[in-house]
């Protein structure tokens, strides 16, 4: 979705990611990483008695994965700029599949090298329910980086093939 420098983007542009299934492993690894062992996520018996009758995927994990699913080109992305109005509208369960949908809703000049692109970001599940929504802002370069970090042999190979792949 964000594959072009700031000046080439426009309001209303949209994009959709590939799907990704939230797994038991995702939930357990996130519990380990964050120390969030809340029983709603980690205890099947406890979750049976909770509002949805089963364990939930952590909201912070849903947000982390959905925003990472946005297709973008790292040669134009400078940084994550912020998130506003984050809401979890429906629960996400283990084995739900999510897609990220973005629509550019604001473009703001930042400085001589960057602009801020704000998108409405939604996480949508296999039941066509919006489970998460926010305004997600990225700092985008006005000029694309020229294959940063490539060693000379790799750069020479790219130049020889003009970016064609095998």
Image (cartoon, grey):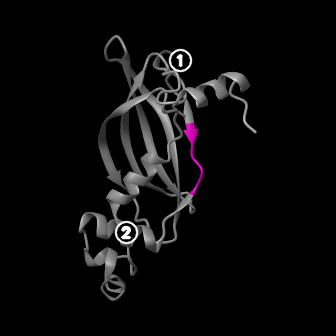
Sooner in the amino-acid sequence: mark 2 or mark 1: 1
**Distance from the alpha carbon under mark 2 to that under mark 1:** 38 Å
Does residue 77 sit above or below 85 in this rendering? above
Q: Nearer the viewer, residue 33 or 118?
A: 33
Secondary structure under tag 1 reads: helix
Q: Secondary structure at mark 2?
A: helix
Residue span colored magenta: 15-19
Looking at the image, residue 24 lies above or below residue 133: below
Q: Nearer the viewer, mark 2 or mark 1?
A: 2
Closest to the observer, 72 or 96 = 72
At 43% from the left and 46% from the top, the residue drawn is 67
The quarter of the rendered structure image containing the N terminus is top right
Q: Does the magenta run of residues contain 147?
A: no
Residue 17 belongs to magenta span: yes
Q: Residue at x 33, y 82 (%)?
A: 47
Residue 159 at x, y = what percent?
Answer: 66, 22
- 128 or 46, nearer to the observer: 46
Judge by depth and name the residue closer to the eye, 80 or 99.
Answer: 80
| Residue 52, above or below 155 | below
Residue under label 2: 29
Name the spot of residue 121 as percent of width and height, x first. 44, 42
Q: Quadrant of the C terminus?
A: top right
Q: Residue at x 32, y 78 (%)?
A: 42
Res 160 → quadrant? top right
- The residue under label 1 is 8
């Amino acid at each position: 979705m964000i594959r072009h420098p700031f000046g080439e983007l426009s309001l209303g542009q949209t994009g959709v990611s590939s799907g990704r299934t939230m797994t038991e492993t995702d939930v357990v690894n996130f519990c380990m990483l964050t120390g969030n062992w809340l029983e709603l996520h980690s205890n099947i018996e406890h979750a049976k008695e909770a509002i949805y009758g089963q364990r939930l995927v952590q909201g912070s994990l849903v947000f982390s994965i959905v925003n990472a699913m946005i297709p973008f080109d790292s040669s134009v992305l400078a940084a994550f700029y912020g998130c506003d109005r984050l809401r979890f509208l429906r629960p996400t369960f283990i084995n739900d599949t999510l897609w990220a949908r973005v629509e550019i809703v604001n473009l703001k000049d930042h400085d001589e090298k960057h602009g801020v692109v704000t998108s409405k970001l939604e996480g949508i599940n296999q039941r066509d329910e919006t489970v998460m929504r926010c305004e997600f802002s990225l700092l985008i370069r006005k000029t694309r980086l020229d294959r940063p970090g490539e060693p000379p042999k790799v750069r020479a190979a790219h130049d020889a093939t003009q970016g064609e792949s095998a």
